[in-house]
Image (cartoon, rainbow, N blue to C red):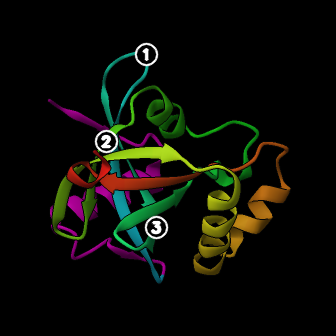
Amino acid sequence: MEITDSPVAWVADHIRSYVASDGESGHRYQGKDALLLTTRGRRTGTLRRTALFYGADGDRLVVVGSNGGSAHHPAWVLNVRADPEVAVQVGAERFAARARVTEGDERERLWALMLEIFPSYGGMQKKTSRELPVMVIERAEAAG
């Protein structure tokens, strides 16, 4: 099935470089680790891919639905809430995974981790009244 990349031009450019180089160009982006996340569109069923900075919590990957501090969640967050089965590329490695929004103490601990990795998330959180979702991504075989 065909995958539609982010409609945001600089993100789509990053994704194209990442895919074309099998992760050699793009896994490190602006000095941080980035992954590609593919979700299924909640209304269209279209596969949609975006690039996100990530952190690691043991074997799990952690991402933030910042949308630049916009009042609205990014589409990928809404898609994950509707269908948590996702595909991930980290460097050259591709795998099926399951994503979920964290809450409570787990969210607070992982939010602190992500603020260390990308301090700009703090400013983005201040720009909006919505709580920026912190998501955990687990390999499909580990998520069981």
Which portion, as a residue range, is magenta? Answer: 1-30
**Residue 23 image-quadrant placement:** bottom left
* Whether residue 102 is situated above or below residue 117 in the rendered picture: above
* C-alpha gap between disc 3 and disc 2: 15 Å
Instruction: Identify which residue, 48 or 83, lies in the foreground.
Output: 83
* C-alpha gap between disc 2 and disc 1: 16 Å
Circles 3 and 2, Cβ within 8 Å, touching? The answer is: no
Residue 89 covered by magenta stretch: no
Residue at image location 67% in from the left, 72% down from the top: 112
Residue type for callout 3:
Tyr
Residue at image location 19% in from the left, 54% down from the top: 95
Residue type for callout 1:
Arg
Q: In the rendering, at what x and y percent does residue 69 appear?
A: 73, 51
Q: In the rendering, at what x and y percent does residue 74 appear?
A: 57, 40
Q: Nearer the viewer, mark 2 or mark 1?
A: 2
In terms of sequence position, does the residue under pointer 3 or pointer 2 come before the other?
Answer: 3
**For mark 2, what is the residue?**
86
Q: In the rendering, at what x and y percent does residue 20 appear?
A: 16, 62
**For mark 1, what is the residue?**
43
* C-alpha gap between disc 1 and disc 3: 26 Å
